Image (cartoon, rainbow, N blue to C red):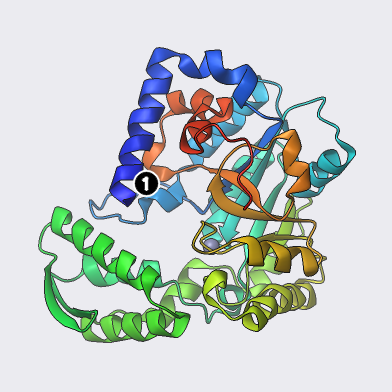
Amino acid sequence: MKQFRNAVIRAGLGALYFTGAHALLRPILSGVGAVFTLHHVRPCRQTEFQPNHHLEVTPEFLRATLSHLRARGIDIISLDEMHQRLIERNFARRFACFTFDDGYRDNRDFALPVMREFDAPFTLFVASDFAEGTGRLWWEALERVIARTTSLDVTIGGVAEGLDAATPAAKQAAFHRLHDWLRALPGGHDVRREISALCARHGVDEAAICPELCMSWDELKSFCGDPLVSIGAHTISHCNLAKQTGETAHHEMTESRARIETALQREVLHFAYPYGDRIAAGAREFTLARAAGYKTAVTTRPGMIFTESAGHLAALPRVSLNGNYQDERILPVLTSGAATALWNGFRRVDAA
Ligand SMILES: [Zn+2]
């Protein structure tokens, strides 16, 4: 399914660009603005096996995106400002917001300087366990396990399997198989147990990953001293909220904010659902985010912001700046809204 969707997007983006269809469709599709999702921002790595590559863009691609928006007179605004414009129904100017999920240190080292060049505000969504240094970045752990081995023995659904991981292609296939399996497990503790076992068996220091990649509270404190930076919440443990009991989901959404506010002495007004897709955030989570008092909550459902989005502030779509499509020629397609409209079957709002 994932490969199919990627193929559709790749064909769709290419086709839209080369036919120029995005320019014709723009007046009806572009909406009033867009919220971009980013994760890592860092220079290209040279290894062939990079299964999480979609989660990173280079500083150059970020710069190209910002230039593209500025050249078109699109305002780059904070989530607070977007919220204000949506509730006032002030749609005189198109806007873009930039959001960075998880709290990676490379956001400070590589993204912040670029954002400063354009005087562009942005929000960092912090999972409080990640700032604590105790978070589990299981997708990263899985990449490291597979990178260092030529085969894996796993038990999936009670059946023992040997997976080949000798070549980059085999590693990629093994990653997809295990990633899909782990995401389908019932609880976060199941994922932790399986990943810990894999790390132990293959000599990966799982506990070192979080402090290696994520900013600590101290680092975040100086980072958020920059006037361009706002901090949002992204749960405590980076769990799939839809798989939690209502009580746990509520706790993850409110306690993470309390921890951030205590540690950073900054008000937290916005929320991002971890994973953020349909299987991680739905109607119940949207209600919980509203009840928790967040001004806005963002998903990873692809889409532009339309005037109607003002009625769905806890279920806002975003546009991913995906590391697999870092081609400047794609930018007009992304900002035209044609790519996300294609994905959504031309529905403007998808908040159910
Ligand atoms: Zn995240």
Residue 89 falls left or right of residue 120: right
Front one among 302 and 112: 302
Q: Nearer the viewer, residue 175 or 261?
A: 175
Q: Residues within 10 Å of mark 1 (few under 14, many from 20)?
A: few
Please tell me in which quadrant of the rendered image residue 27 appears.
top right
Beta carbon of the mark 1 residue lies under 8 A of ligand 1 = no
Residue 108 visible? The answer is: no
Can you give x and y, in whole percent of width and height, for residue 305 in the image?
67, 38
Task: Describe residue 107's horizontal placement relative to residue 83 as left or right.
Answer: left
Q: Which residue is mark 1?
A: 44
Q: Residue visible at 69% across and 33% down?
A: 33
User: Helix or strand or loop: what does disc 1 sit on?
Assistant: loop
The x and y percentages for residue 314 are: 71, 56
Instruction: Please name the amino acid that badge 1 sits on.
Output: Cys
Q: Position of residue 83 (x, y in %)?
A: 81, 46
Nearer to me, 78 or 20:
20
Q: Quadrant of residue 288?
A: bottom right
Q: Which residue: 67% across, 67% down?
A: 220
Rendered residue at 52%/35% (across/down):
340
Q: Is residue 10 above or below residue 16?
A: below
Give percent across and percent down for residue 307: 75, 34
| Residue 96 in view of the camera | yes
